[in-house]
Amino acid sequence: MRKSVFFLLVFCTAAASACLGNGQRIVSEPGYTADSSVDWAAGTISLEITHSLDPSTPSLARAKGDAETDLDARLPEFLSRAISPVTVDSSHTLGDLLKADAALFARVNDLALRARRAELALSPDLSTLRARYVIPLFGEQGIASPLFPSTETLLRPRLGEVTTRAYTGLLIFAKGALPMAGASRPAAARPALFPRIWDEQMNLVLDKGTCSPEWLQRWGMVGYSSDVEDPALALRVGNLPLRLAARGVFGDVPTDIIISVDGARQLLALPENIALLREGRICIVYDSLE
């Protein structure tokens, strides 16, 4: 029953939810509110649901138990609303993909329904029950894991003379309004599960198919930050990353990053740098992680 309800809601809510961002109210109806947010830096989706207790129930314990039962019954619906707007790449949300592939839906559905309940508590005035769930984006239980390729396409060295060395990672500074390839207007880069990287001649440098499935499972394709000085970046890109400024963005949604031709050659000229790409030792610094 849960699966059928969840599947129906994915179809009904994906389009309406596609515009939702971080910290958005996804449900507001008598007795219920639900808010969801994506923490790209932490790689999680949070879902917080509040449900009013029935004031006519004489026992507080009974009213709390009834509210928890009701909340569990509605959980698949609320989870569908929370995960559907997640941006997968420059052309798709997770809801788009779930609508198009029933087998994928079943796998993602199972993962979402295993969401960890991080908190369950009554409000200070004992009138509502609040539950918070945390859904990982990556890892074995991450909702992105069914999207990982089963095999890896090898990255080929890029020809052309360039001065380079072995780096420990790639740090891309993508703040500010950036030129948008194929359009006359600038746009701010936006985070996604699988942002492609291109050079200025629109040669593909990296996409999820050229990443190691093992490393995708570990921590996804890239890391996300809004602070270039964040000391946590070193955990992903090491102490000697190649630092590049994004030259532009690309896609229906501006999630793909364009770097310089020389930067692409620096990355693709040495086996050590090709390895850092396929292992996802990349962090993109955004204006906003919403």
Image (cartoon, rainbow, N blue to C red):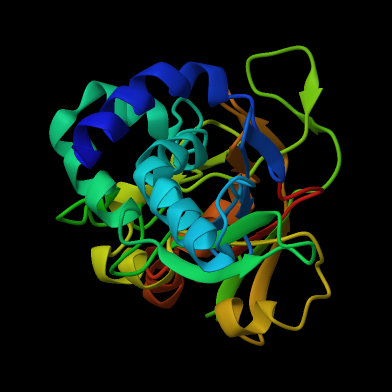
At which x and y percent is residue 239? 66, 87
Question: Does residue 161 appear anywhere in the picture?
Answer: no
Q: Residue at x 25, y 63 (%)?
A: 213
Residue 15 is left or right of residue 285, and the answer is left
Residue at the outermost front position: 58
In the picture, the quarter occupied by the C terminus is: top right
In the picture, the quarter occupied by the N terminus is: top left
Location of residue 246 with respect to 114 vertically, above or below: above
Question: Does residue 112 appear anywhere in the picture?
Answer: yes
Q: Quadrant of residue 214?
A: bottom left
At which x and y percent is residue 221? 44, 59
Residue at the outermost bottom position: 239
Q: Looking at this view, is 38 or 75 the one in front? A: 75
Q: Residue at x 52, y 80 (%)?
A: 166
At which x and y percent is residue 184? 77, 12
Q: Quadrant of residue 20?
A: top right
